[in-house]
Amino acid sequence: MAFTHQQTNRSISRFTINTSNINQFYQAVQNARLGENWPVVYLLHNDHFNVGASINQKLLYIGETTSAFRRMMEHFSVSNTNYPERAKLDVAHIIFDQTFNKSAILDIEQELIHMFSADSSKYELQNRNDGQSSQHQYYERDQYITSLRDIWEDLRKSPINMAVDSFDEVRNSNLFKYSPYTALTPQQKKVCEQIVNSLIDAICNGKDFNAVISGVAGTGKTVVLIKVLSELMHIANSPVATPLPASSSPVSPSSPPKFNDDEENFGQALTRQIKASRLKAAKPNGLKIAYVVPLSELLQPFKNVIKAVYGDDSIVKCATEVANTPGQYDIIFVDEAHRLGTINKFGANKNPYKLACLNAMGVAYTPGMINPPTELDWIHKKSNCCVYVYDEGQKVRSHKSIEHRDFDRIVLNQSFTTQYVLTTQMRCKAGDKYVRFLDDLFNSKINGSTPLPPWKGYDFRVYDDVGKMVTDINAYNNPGNCGLSRVVAGYGWKWVTMGKNRTELKTLSKSGWDIHIDGYDYFWNVQNGNFIFKADSEEIGCIHTVQGFDLNYVGIIFGPEIKYDPNNGFSIDETHIFDSGVKTRDKAQLLKFTLRAYKVMMERGIRGCYVYACDPGLQKYLKCNVPSPAAAQNNLEMTVNRGIIKLTGLDISSNGTGISGGKVELNKVEVDAIVSGHGGIGSIKTITIDGKPYDVTGSQISKDGDYYVFSIT
């Protein structure tokens, strides 16, 4: 039985796998159209494999091949060392498409592995790696990646019913964003490999080693950190080469490693087994690892991610837990190390701090102590090998988090520390241009070399009406939209509703809420309210709720604490600073931390950023450099929904953009993804815009080569 996608002639065919009559399965695959000697992607699964009394385990293996027939024979051969695992799978879904090529199936395989690792279908992936895509470019790559949405939706539909969550739900999740199945850029991959190799060498030779992963927001530092952990665990759990080589030197095994159907090649299998052998010789009882998350709000989200990576979320700890755990750790991973705390983080009750100092360092804290230990001191003392994610530019609190000089002294200045700097912007669709613009904006250095908006594909706008901005951001959270969009603000309002939950807040008069701007009323994010995933439409977040997270769209309210005038630039009104962790007598430092907070919040938006300022001078400055809603709307791309009328036309959504001069500009990648193999661009005779049909009288490619320009009547 095949599920056929009529627009592309792509089909997803279902085959039953019966190991007692495996030749029947092989024959069915061989007889299928494109079943032999054609690139395909396939999913082998068993939704109800019994692993014990009343226990059902959903298993899945995703792969690609240039011959489905040959590859199935490899998977289900009894000589395959993974045969006991593959024999648990009794259904094959093979994706056939006459437009597939080798590069395309590598990409689609990797993306499907990545997405199923985060989907609510809860398959246990048998894949030992993240597929073989290395993010290289190839002809019409964007077209194939665009088609992934259709493939995913086909996998959700009856009769296949494999995937559960929508395409956007999966890609909005933390499990997807931080999955070890994420394809790394060449730079990220190189950093990951270097850190893993250095950690293994240090552990096996009893040496100290620190790795510091740095880079501006959005460069994928946490992705690399989790990938290092995942790869290290993969190696530690791999079969060892025999006999065991000495831990101090990588000796080749006397016999070749066992082969399986999940390794890329002989060299990869051999290298992993040698590394596994060295680790087992040095640490026969396994590695003792901790993954430190400095902020309590991030603990549970990262427990969910690490459980998927490591199988055990107990390794995710705060710094105090690490300090109080008996014995030494082999490796400590620290995410957002710039947020590690000082004694001031602990408020009036210093007992937890005192106990941690005693357990981690044998130091008895006394009031008035010079340079009292920090959470960084505890971590440094508890392990000889640490991997830190560190970005000084994201330190937004004064006395409650460590100073850069402390990180310099304890980590960066050590001879056994190596710093790895990531440079490629991975989050924001505007890329490095947006980061450079924000640097110039907040440094009051907008000039001729500043990359100015608008940028095609990134929605950046300034509002005169804060209520309209909040409404527009919240609209993205409506069903059918991209979701995961939030409004945040600085430090300009007191948190008078602290301690109340959302239900209680809704019963209050809005005059008792926290934030009041031009007749609009809002309340600060509730404590332990999981703001990122469960925010109310009238709830405003802060730097502490969004730092470390990605959003699709972010709305920024510049509060009354931050001001601007063209002669003196930015200034701070300390009477409107209501975050005790930011307050300091040093006004210059207070301004620096406040501007950093706003910059970090503006960097959260993947698809767009909307801004509004309470101060008239700052609002004017923003309006001089950021597009208005109307200008930004004209910069949006129309969205191609689908081909219609047997691929003689297109159905598109205008997204509010107008038709100017009888011309329609459509993203070339989206159009190519639909018309490829079906007569090309010349097959488009009609375009239906928001339900209204138009005839196409001509078409051409835009000067930048990114768009088709259709003439319509």
Image: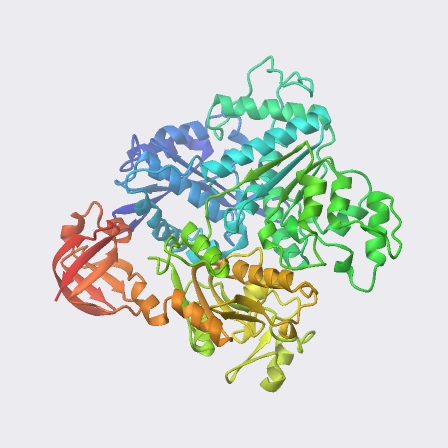
Q: Quadrant of residue 469?
A: bottom left
Residue 164 can be seen in this image: no
Image quarter (top left, top right, bottom left or bottom right) of the C terminus: bottom left
State left or right for residue 476 relative to residue 686.
Answer: right
Measured from the top left, where is residue 499 in percent x and y? 70, 74
Could you say where residue 214 lies in the image, as x and y percent from the top left?
57, 44
In this rendering, position of residue 366 left or right of residue 18: right
| View extreme (front): residue | 567
On screen, residue 687 versus residue 563, left or right, reads: left
Query: Where is residue 361 drawn, in percent x and y?
Result: 83, 43
Q: Is residue 46 visible?
A: yes
Q: Position of residue 157 (x, y in %)?
A: 38, 56
Would you place residue 503 above or below residue 242 in this image? below
The residue sitting at the left extreme is: 697
Tell me if residue 430 comes above or below residue 570 in the rendering: above
Residue 235 or 545: which is nearer the viewer?
A: 545
Give the residue drawn at x 42%, y 53%.
Answer: 161
Q: Nearer the viewer, residue 638 or 603?
A: 603
**Disc count in the image?**
0
Q: Residue at x 62, y 80 (%)?
A: 505
Q: Which residue reaches farthest top?
A: 254
Residue nearest the viewer, comparing 665 with 670: 665
Residue sitting at x 39%, y 40%: 107
Q: Is 659 placed above or below 75 here?
A: below
- Near-viewer residue (613 or 109): 613
